[in-house]
Image (spheres, rainbow, N blue to C red):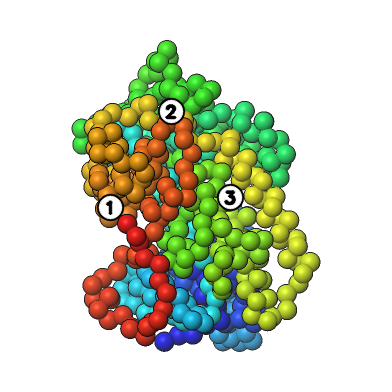
Amino acid sequence: MARFDLAVIGAGPAGLSAAVTAAEHGLRVALVDAGTQPGGQFWRHPDEHHPRPDEGRGQHLWSRFTDLRTRLRGLESDSGTAGRVELVSGHQVWFVDTLAEEFLLHLSATQGETRLPEIHAAALVLCPGGYDRQLPVPGWDLPGVMAAGGVQALLKAHRSVAGRRAIVAGTGPFLLPVAAGLAEAGAEVVAVCEAGSLSGWARRPLGAAAVPSKALEAVEYAALLARHRIPYRMRTVVTAIHGETEVGSVGLGRLDRNGRLRTDVSLADLDVDLVAFGWGFTPSLELITAVGATTRVDVDESLVADVDDWQRTDVPGAYVAGEATGVGGALLAVAEGELAALAASRDAGRPVSEPRVRYLQRQIARGRRFAATMHRAHPVPTGWQDWLQPDTTVCRCEETTLGEICAATEELGATDARTVKLLARPGMGWCQGRVCGFAAAKLAKPVGEALTVSDLAPLAKRTFAAPVSLERLATTSTESDGATSHDNDA
């Protein structure tokens, strides 16, 4: 049994920042991450045991990562500040018990043997990050269709290109680094299809200017796209994917200013063997709901953790930082992680710098303004359901079609996402709604109606935050008598 002052879950930008800051303020910290090395999805890179000279090639904020990694290694070392951080890599938290005075985390290894099955921590900083939001398209279950984040992960960690002739489609700035990365790695990128328009940024100049470095990144990516002669098609979407056993071509459609599919415009199909889809990101909320923290709906209709101006949730001792408080990028996540660690240190009786706190709070406020502008400039198009067919698969795990979801609402009287889930089974499979949850929730409501917490919360609650073996369940400690857990009510 291991006991710590603070457990930080996730070793991405927010988690790394939180762990080193808390340890430097004297707390004993456990940093738990499913990956085998720190960095998370944003700073994913080749195996550090076999380093390459170009391990940071194409990585933004790489010097920030290497600084955090160096500080982390110093805090793990046997000299000076020995033992302030224990990095528990290759492990994930599958269950959280809320005890009277602390949290009990149940861990399992992502590969090999479980080195540390349980952790007791007086406080938690939850930095679970997020994953690609997806929308169904006819043919999206064919081999060769991938999430944009998955395509980029292959490039960053393995220098592996998922296809030879690719199209990158969806909405948001993330499409640009994915397309640029594919082109730099030797793939032919036939187009970037952006469902929105850059005019959305022009309508909100103050928010766009809140983080000036983002404009420089955009210029850099625009130059890369121009150098590789990659067309950037605005208000354009992939409406169908064709192929027998794998992707062979895609059909395109043009959207009007209201995000509805235009029927007066016909676009030629494009031959491709890779489709990289990205409709923004969705926070991972399994651990937030596991501790019982309150959630809210953000500007982009994602369910996010509700925190105060110190990153505290309404659960004593639980803090959240990074994408789980609202998708906003790595710079914002680093600032939130540091602030959460300062809050945890202060609440534990350690002195913290008040000027530093105020600086971070101002930086976070600017980051949030930019994030809100980004989400409003790149919304999921109102008419995304226009290109679906009754036999279009919505939930790939359970093979639930649009027709079956419509039958649940129109014939069986389902009026909310939870009831649709029970009747038609979207979100009941292996991924537990992580891929189809947003689409299924939207399909359960009238077109154009905004999602609410009650629509999204049942899809985010999961008894187990990660897969766990029956053997691990059978050997789990029963010490947590009297603990409070927040199980899935679906």
**What residue is at 72 percent from the left and 39 percent from the top?**
206
Q: Amino acid at mark 2?
A: Gly
The crowd level at tag 1 (other Cα within 10 Å; few <14, some 14-19, many 20+) is some
Q: Does residue 148 appear left or right of residue 114 in this picture? A: right
Tell me residue 459's x, y (percent).
38, 52
Q: Quadrant of the N terminus?
A: bottom left
| Residue underneath mark 2 | 383
- Camera sees residue 210: yes
Above or below for 255 versus 89: above
| Residue underneath mark 3 | 328
Camera-side residue of 415 and 282: 415
Q: Does residue 131 appear left or right of residue 208 in this picture? A: left
Camera-side residue of 305 and 372: 305
| Residue underneath mark 1 | 428
Q: Does residue 154 appear left or right of residue 218 in this picture? A: left
Q: Amino acid at mark 1?
A: Met
Separation (CA) of disc 3 from disc 1: 29 Å
Contact check, label 2 and label 1, Cβ < 8 Å:
no
Q: Any mark on residue 297, and which? A: none
Tell me the quarter of the picture where residue 460 sits: bottom left
Q: Quadrant of the C terminus?
A: bottom left
The secondary element bearing badge 2 is classed as loop
Camera-side residue of 120 and 114: 120
Above or below for 344 versus 84: above
Q: Nearer the viewer, mark 3 or mark 1?
A: 1
Tell me residue 227's x, y (percent).
55, 32
The secondary element bearing badge 1 is classed as loop
Q: Amino acid at mark 3?
A: Gly
